[in-house]
Image (cartoon, helix red, strand yellow):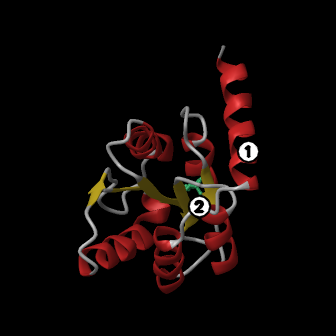
């Protein structure tokens, strides 16, 4: 299950990704927003991020105007590694090296076609593990220290 969320700034690219998931028969849960009326991105980013942290969803794709606000929000949730991505190389590498579990994109930064391409790469690229596993574990250790 893929968690989707957006604010008004990310609505169009979220819809493009949602249509892609429909066409590919990839199950998703859409946490909103559901139109272009102005809303507060933390509300929606938190819902999607919690569903990934709680393992209801395996991965998330969340969008706002830049991708930055939703990523800052999602990264406050324990267990979330959310990455703002604007190109194909980073979409691949954030899965391979960072084991990112949420892809963040900006509707005022990239077009719908690019958003779908980046989502496709993100969803189909596995984590490399190995030396990268240790580094990702180090991020988790920092998170645990911070919250203790
Ligand atoms: C909304 O205007 C905009 O601030 C939001 O979509 C996002 O870009 C914040 O990071």
Q: Check residue 127 in the rendering and tell me which mark sits there, or answer none.
A: 2
* Residue drawn at 69 percent across, 77 percent down: 89
* Image quadrant where residue 34 sits: bottom left
Left or right position of 132 against 72: right
Mark 2 Cα-neighbour bin, 10 Å: few <14, some 14–19, many ≥20: some
Q: Which residue is drawn at 38% across and 36% down?
A: 54
List the single residue furthest toward the front: 130
Q: Nearer the viewer, residue 17 or 135?
A: 135
Q: Which element is circle 1 on?
A: helix
Image quadrant assignment for residue 141: top right
Q: Residue 45: where, in percent of width, then height? A: 46, 46
Q: Quadrant of ligand 1?
A: bottom right
User: Of marks 2 and 1, which one's residue comes earlier in the chain?
Assistant: 2
The residue that mark 1 highlights is 134
Up the image or down, 74 lies above or below 92; here it is above
Q: Give coordinates of residue 142: x percent, y percent.
A: 74, 30
Alpha-carbon span between mark 2 and mark 1: 12 Å
Using the image, determine if residue 140 lies above or below residue 52: above
Query: Of residues 3 and 33, which is closer to you in this image?
Result: 3
Crowdedness near tag 1: few (<14), some (14–19) or many (≥20) residues, C-alpha within 10 Å = few
Quarter in which the N terminus is drawn: bottom left
Q: Which residue is drawn at 66% across and 34% down?
A: 140
């Amino acid at each position: 299950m893929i968690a989707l969320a957006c604010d008004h700034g990310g609505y169009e690219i979220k819809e493009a990704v949602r249509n892609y998931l429909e066409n590919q028969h990839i199950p998703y849960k859409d946490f909103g927003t559901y139109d272009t009326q102005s809303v507060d991105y933390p509300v929606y980013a938190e819902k999607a991020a919690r569903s990934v942290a709680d393992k209801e969803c395996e991965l998330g794709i969340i969008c706002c105007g830049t991708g930055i606000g939703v990523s800052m929000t999602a990264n406050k949730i324990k267990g979330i590694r959310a990455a703002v991505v604007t190109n194909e190389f980073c979409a691949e590498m954030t899965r391979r090296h960072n084991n990112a579990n949420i892809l963040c994109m900006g509707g005022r930064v990239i077009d719908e076609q690019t958003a779908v391409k980046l989502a496709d790469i993100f969803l189909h690229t596995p984590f490399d593990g190995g030396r990268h596993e240790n580094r990702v574990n180090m991020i988790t250790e920092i998170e645990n220290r911070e919250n203790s």
